[in-house]
Image (cartoon, rainbow, N blue to C red):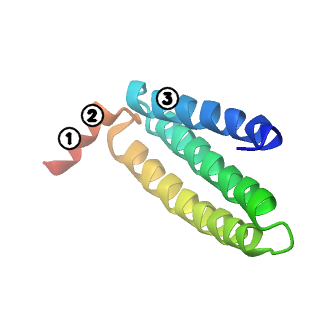
């Protein structure tokens, strides 16, 4: 592995690990969504880095990253709409209280 690539992959691994930690430890749906977005951004960074170092003249990794960012933005909009509806129904965004909507 090229040492220059390592300078990009280490922050990506740290971002992904922080996202996993945040997703597993938080009970608030908004914080979980932010952690999920952090993990997706770390994966997008990996696409760009591997494209740059493995195929420097091509743009497939960059284009794939743009599509992934667009899809993540759409998913975030839908998730925030769902979270707002849950907040209106039960009064908070705690994951443990979301099962109250069953009844």
Residue toward you, 6 or 36: 6
Q: Which residue is mark 2?
A: 97
- Residue pictured at 58% horizontal, 47% vertical: 37
Q: Name the residue at 43% across, 27% down.
A: 26
Residue found at the far left of this picture: 103
Q: What residue lies at 45% left-to-right and 48% top-to-bottom?
A: 83
Q: Nearer the viewer, residue 46 or 95?
A: 46
Q: Secondary structure at mark 3?
A: helix
Q: Say above or below: 17 vs 76.
A: above
Nearer the N terminus, badge 1 or badge 3?
A: 3
Along the horizontal axis of the image, is 95 left or right of 80? Answer: left
Residue 66 picture location, percent across and down: 72, 68
Quadrant, the N terminus: top right
Dot 1 lies on which element? helix
Closer to the chain start, of discs 2 and 3, is 3
Alpha-carbon span between mark 1 and mark 3: 24 Å
What label does residue 22 carry, if any? 3
Q: Residue at x 48, y 55 (%)?
A: 79
Q: CA distance from mark 2 to mark 1?
A: 6 Å
**Residue 17 spot, x, y in % from top left:** 53, 31
Q: Nearer the viewer, mark 2 or mark 3?
A: 3
């Amino acid at each position: 592995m090229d040492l220059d690539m390592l300078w990009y992959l280490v922050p990506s691994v740290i971002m992904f690990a922080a996202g996993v930690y945040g997703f597993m430890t938080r009970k608030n749906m908004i914080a979980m969504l932010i952690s999920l977005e952090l993990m997706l951004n770390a994966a997008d960074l990996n696409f760009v880095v591997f494209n740059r170092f493995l195929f420097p003249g091509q743009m497939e990794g960059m284009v794939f990253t743009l599509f992934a960012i667009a899809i993540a933005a759409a998913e975030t909009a839908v998730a925030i709409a769902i979270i707002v509806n849950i907040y209106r129904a039960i009064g908070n965004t705690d994951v443990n209280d979301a099962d109250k909507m069953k009844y």
